[in-house]
Amino acid sequence: MTASKSIIADLNHGDKLNEKNYDVWHRKIEYLLEEQEILETITQPMAEPEQGNTAQHRLDMEAYQTYKHKDRVARILMLSSMRNDILLHFERHRSAQSVWDVVKIQYEGTFTTKLHQLTLKFDGYKKHQNQTMRQHLTVMSNMISELRGVGHKMIDEQQVQAVIHFLPSN
């Protein structure tokens, strides 16, 4: 199975955009659009050429028609990778770039807020005296997984330092 087919399968079987997975969804859509050679529909929009009858105008129109086809495919890929209730909010946008931009506005702030909340929770955590070391490590592991889930990467050494740092002082 090619990488793009695997990503499409993921997006259609449970990894659809929801309120909590914008960062992962965003990256998967970018990978998919790049693999399908249609990423430029969200990064380099093309305006319709003015009317004309020259050879250059015909070439411009042909390029524009190719772009419009790619734009439709990109838009459909994005919309089909959203939960139905979310799709209803974005289907009125007629271009891939418009869908991309409004989804980003809607969910990136949510992502940033989530990252901030998880970071504060992580930074403020201390092992409780009644917790076993196993419980402490489980809590730490869960918080690290949550942070990783929103794109925050920690190398192994940072994780070990955090586990030690969050032990009680006595």
Image (spheres, rainbow, N blue to C red):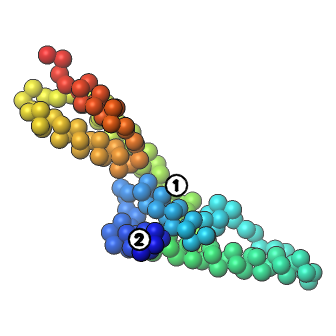
> Which mark identifies residue 105?
1
The residue lying furthest to the top in this view is 170
Near-viewer residue (77 or 79)? 77
Q: Residue at x 12, y 37 (%)?
A: 134
How many residues crowd mark 2 within 10 Å: few (<14), some (14–19), many (20+)?
few
Q: CA distance from mark 1 to mark 2?
A: 27 Å
Residue 98 in which image quadrant: bottom right
Mark 2: which amino acid? Ser
> How far across and down, in percent of the image, does residue 8 sit?
43, 72
Q: Residue at x 43, y 61 (%)?
A: 25
The quarter of the picture where the N terminus appears is bottom left
**First in residue order: circle 1 vs circle 2:** 2
Q: Which residue is mark 2?
A: 6
The quarter of the picture where the C terminus appears is top left
Q: Can you say whether 67 is above or below 132 in the image?
A: below
Mark 1: which amino acid? Ile
| Apparent side of residue 62 relative to residue 169 in the rendered image (left or right) | right
How many residues crowd mark 1 within 10 Å: few (<14), some (14–19), many (20+)?
few
> How far across and down, in percent of the image, does residue 126 sit?
21, 28
**1 vs 2, front mark:** 2
